[in-house]
Image: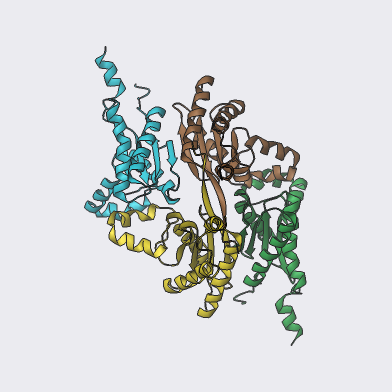
Chain colours: A yellow, B cyan, C brown, D green
């Protein structure tokens, strides 16, 4: 019997650097956003509400991150799914905390969902740009293959 | 005056065997699902989240089972009902925990609803197949007529 | 930057075997219990409500498992903590889902909390015996050192 | 008629620096904590859950910050209040999200409550030390007199 299985979970360092990168992009856009990172189990990992970001954005950013981690899909992809599947469209409101417009992305490392990032405060396009800036931290640090895989290469 | 009436309720044995049968079908399909059984009162009876099943599936599987037991209809039949009844379609979101896409079935023994089974983790078709595999336990054990009826035949 | 860190999480196999072992002990005691396993993030992993277990036990068993996984302590140890720490005792009711009487234990593999098991339906002593029977599955399968550590020994 | 009044609210910069300072102290202590900052309205401003911090700490840290900002008192001072006021002690559980053990402090600038910081993960003494480290950011940046007051000096 296999008693346990392994999960990879977004680190505090990555979670904080993602906030910083998102804030950088937000300043370029000249708007204030709420930015949330959740772990692979949907639990809040890091968060910032920029000065002046809309109040409603606080919940929406967190739930976008939750939605993205909770099913492994960007939130805007959910909208496309609903367009193709009318029963799902009729019933999606019954799925707790599901946000189906842009601004949430899964955080994927080495092919595994290790968390989610959600952004709210602008229109969907702006929210997506800010979230994408957060995800670029992963590429820059060349950690997209995951610690375990790298560890194996070194043995 | 009749002081009480009887309910038939899904047993712990059936509830556990339904999980096992559903897991068997899930492995055939090569995906991980959350699988829930509730009793005739909508109370959780048995549950398993397979390793790696999406986080969101936990709530959805339980609520599909609840919906199915709660009105005696498979969840995909609710969608058909909503299509035929516009007031119901407009208002269904006000019914707590109602899931109207496939993957939930009432558990019916001897013509009575004794519980519900709900599955989430794949697309609607896959969820339905896994839930149907759970229901097949009933046929195999020849209990579909209900214990009380069989007992009557033997007297 | 370390992008992720690893978690070990209770497997579906262990979670189901723990239910079976707990049911075995429950039958010895001649009572019906609700038995819940949650993962390392407090998400429901497996569950059974034995036939006739009190309705209230459903929530209590799940929250005992959550409490145990959520802080890494058996629920009866929380009572001892509260006895030593009056401010905590005054305020513990504000901690969501915290159960401070016996029947919940962390599931520990290789020194890590990989989940929690919670039992409700009898008195605290009975609940604890049933939960302990579930934990004994770990010892029997000699997996208490964790998969990763065993893997290392074999390399 | 005075149509509006002004609030001072913790800035995103201060809120992020407080997280960093708290993490620094946490590493000294060798433990993992959840650390939350809320604004003067109790709304989440910044948050980090350090790798391995107990699950239960997520809610408790946020609610400690909320409690501190919500009445302008450190959370451990609430316990002293309750000890002196029996009706309050009997009824405090009815106050939503009130945490009455140590680890939450108001953030005070120029004599005004501009937010709250809450820490959870260790014992009360450790939580308090980490929260106090976050508050020291204020002293270092010489902003304790408030921006408006300094602005007045410069005119």
User: As drawn, is B25 to the left or to the right of C22?
Assistant: left
- Could you say which quadrant of the image residue A86 lies in? bottom left
Q: Percent x, y for residue C150? A: 57, 41
**Residue sitting nearer the eye, C68 or C6:** C6
Which residue in the rendered view is the most extreme toward the bottom? D155
Q: Say if D3 sits above or below D78 in the image.
A: below
Q: Is residue D147 visible?
A: yes
Position of D140 relative to D69 (above/below): below
Q: Position of residue B8 (x, y in %)?
A: 35, 27
Placement of the C terminus of chain B among the 4 image quadrants:
top left
Residue B153 in picture, x, y percent from top left: 24, 16
Q: Residue at x 45, y 56 (%)?
A: A97
**In this image, C144 relative to B11: left or right?**
right
Q: Residue furthest left?
A: B84
The picture places residue A48, in percent across and down from the top left corner, at 58, 66
Who is closer to the viewer here, C96 or A145? A145
Q: Residue furthest top?
A: B155
On-image quarter of the N terminus of chain B:
top left
Q: Is residue C35 left or right of residue C82?
A: left
């Amino acid at each position: 019997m296999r008693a346990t299985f392994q999960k990879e979970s977004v680190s505090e360092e990555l979670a904080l650097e993602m906030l910083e990168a998102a804030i950088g992009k937000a300043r370029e856009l000249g708007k204030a956003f709420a930015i949330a990172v959740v772990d692979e189990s949907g639990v809040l990992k890091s968060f910032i509400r920029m000065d002046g970001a809309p109040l409603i954005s606080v919940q929406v950013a967190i739930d976008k991150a939750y939605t993205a981690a909770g099913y492994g899909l960007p939130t805007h992809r959910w909208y496309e799914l609903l367009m193709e599947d009318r029963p799902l469209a009729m019933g999606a409101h019954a799925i707790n905390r599901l946000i189906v417009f842009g601004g949430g992305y899964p955080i994927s490392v080495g092919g595994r969902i290790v968390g989610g990032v959600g952004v709210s405060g602008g229109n969907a396009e702006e929210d997506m740009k800010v979230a994408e800036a957060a995800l670029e931290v992963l590429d820059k640090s060349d950690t997209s293959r995951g610690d375990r895989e790298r560890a194996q290469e070194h043995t």
